[in-house]
Amino acid sequence: MIMFFSLLLILSCIACNRSPQPVPQASTATLALTLSPLGNKGNGPLGNGTVRLTPNPQSGNVNCQLVGNQPITCVEQFVRGATVILRVSPEDSTLESINGCNVTKCEGCPLGVTTCQVTMDGDKGVSAVFIGLIK
């Protein structure tokens, strides 16, 4: 009888000490893209622009557009591991700054257009600031 309980105790301890199972990774990653306007020299027109995302995000909305005087944040889902290219096009503005992605050479782009890329190996944030042109 003692032997039976000893064996039962040993087996239960072995079952308790199993290796932890790996936590499954999410199949998507989130890109939060924030666009902000600035006035030229503090009192000029505010900047505007559009950022086009390639490949298409899961929502299908490929453009994040800044119009008006308030920042906008576009949040999109991509397949984890995808390389996302952002094509930044100022409209009556210039691109003051872009952070959170690697700026790349924009082959065949019009003057003022900038491209950058980000690898979606996790959730990412990119910000762009447009400054208005004085006419």
Image: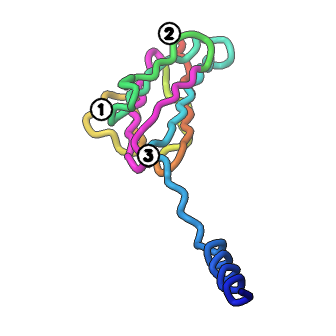
Front residue (pair 20, 85): 20
Seen at 45% across and 35% down, the residue is: 77
State the residue at coordinates (34%, 31%): 56
Q: Which element carries disc 2, helix, strand or loop?
A: loop
Residue 132 in the image: above or below residue 4: above
Marks counted in the figure total: 3
Rendered location of residue 127, percent (x, y)? 56, 33
What is the number of the mark on residue 27?
3
Q: Position of residue 21 (x, y in %)?
A: 55, 64
Q: Main secondary structure of the magenta part?
A: strand
Amino acid type shown at disc 1:
Cys
- Counting residues from the start of the chain, the first of labels 3 and 1 encountered is 3
Q: Residue furthest front?
A: 1
**Is the residue under label 3 in contact with that under label 2 (CB below 8 Å)?**
no
Q: Which residue does the numbered mark 1 point to in the structure image? A: 109
Query: In the rendered structure, which amino acid carries the disc numbered 3?
Result: Ser
Secondary structure under tag 3 reads loop
Q: Which residues are magenta?
A: 72-92
Rendered view: 59 above or below 117: above
In magenta stretch: residue 50: no
The image quadrant that residue 15 belongs to is bottom right
Looking at the image, is mark 2 or mark 1 nearer the viewer? 1
Q: Is residue 40 visible?
A: yes
Label 2 or label 3, whichever comes before in sequence order: 3
